Amino acid sequence: MKKWLNTWPVFLAVMIFVILLARAGQQPEQSVELIVRGDDMGMTHSANEAFELAFNRGILTAGGLIVPSPWFEDAARRCRENRLWSVGVHLCVNAEWQDYRWRPVLPYNLVSSLVDKDGYFFPTAQAFLNNNPRVEELEKELRAQVDRALDRGLRLDYLDTHMDSLETREEYRAVVRRIAREYGLPISGECGEDREFFDIYAVKPELKEKVLIEKLQTARPGLYLLVVHPGLDTPEERAIVDLNPDGLKDVYKYRSAEVKAITSPRVKKVIARRNIKLLSYRDFREQGRIKID
């Protein structure tokens, strides 16, 4: 018995050494990284309220501003007052809502191929394409949108695009890439993110939180992008009707349900338990993980 007690410290030391040696040879454990991007900031006053709620009390990590939209100035002020928010420009050439339209940043006679006879952006991608938009006018308007955001004192971390119009032709995509490169900004969705896994856009409002929790629980290690459209159940947003043929009905239900999901204590609990890393595009830039060609 005495002999065994004398050898036990040696045995324990050897075991500790073996464990430490094994751990030293292991690869660092991979994690789930998630960017939560909100689109359409500035679209309505309710949307701006929803963004502030989602940034300050939820898991939102990035927000894209529609610069030509009616409530952009209010959104810009909120961003200036909350410098820790990571924001970008949601490049826009459509105004898709019934009885609620907006015009380009530039005088519309200078970009006449982008607008209808009244100077408003077209409501659908097809209507936009049917007007044969000129690439040079498109580039001028998109640059003007970025410049106006910068003129308002905003620190921009990325660009992305509103609806599908700017994704329909290679020459339009080339304009977006050129602007991103010249302004030194990454394009959301083109930084290695998996955007498909966390897509809850068309999930029924009453199921959004449940589906998001399931995805958070089952996501494998990797970099993901969750795109949401924050809004609230208000008279302002109840009045909004999408003119796209495949647009969601009762849009306010979907948008307010997404705010509920991304501010849910249950959602935040899963993120904490799984040690999911919430990232913004500012984080990416500061970590040197984004390369601008």
Image: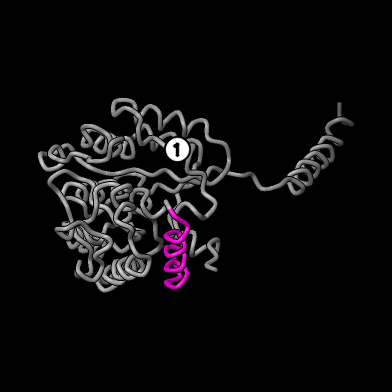
The spot of residue 59 in percent (x, y) is: 36, 45
Magenta span main SS: helix
Q: Residue at x 16, y 52 (%)?
A: 101
Instruction: Indicate whether residue 177 is drawn in magenta.
Output: yes
Q: Is 237 on the left or on the right of 223, as rendered?
A: left
Q: What residue is disc 1 on?
A: 198
Q: Is 82 on the left or on the right of 4, as rendered?
A: left
The spot of residue 42 in percent (x, y) is: 22, 55
Q: Is residue 274 above or below residue 44?
A: above
Q: Is residue 156 above or below residue 102?
A: below
Q: Is 233 on the left or on the right of 125, as rendered?
A: left
Q: Residue at x 78, y 43 (%)?
A: 22
Residue 80 sits in which quadrant? bottom left
**Please, which residue is most extreme toward the left here?**
235
The spot of residue 1 in percent (x, y) is: 86, 26
Q: Residue at x 17, y 60 (%)?
A: 119
Q: How many marks?
A: 1
Residues shaded magenta = 169-185
Q: Secondary structure at mark 1?
A: loop
Q: Tell which of 212 and 1 is nearer to you.
A: 212
Residue 221 sits in which quadrant? top right
Q: Tell which of 125 and 57 is nearer to you.
A: 125
Quadrant position of the C terminus in the picture: bottom right
Q: Report the amino acid beneath label 1.
A: Phe
The spot of residue 68 in percent (x, y) is: 22, 61
Q: Residue at x 26, y 67 (%)?
A: 111
Badge 1 density bin: few <14, some 14–19, many ≥20, Cα 10 Å: many
Residue 288 sits in which quadrant? bottom right
Instruction: Indicate whether residue 290 is drawn in magenta.
Output: no
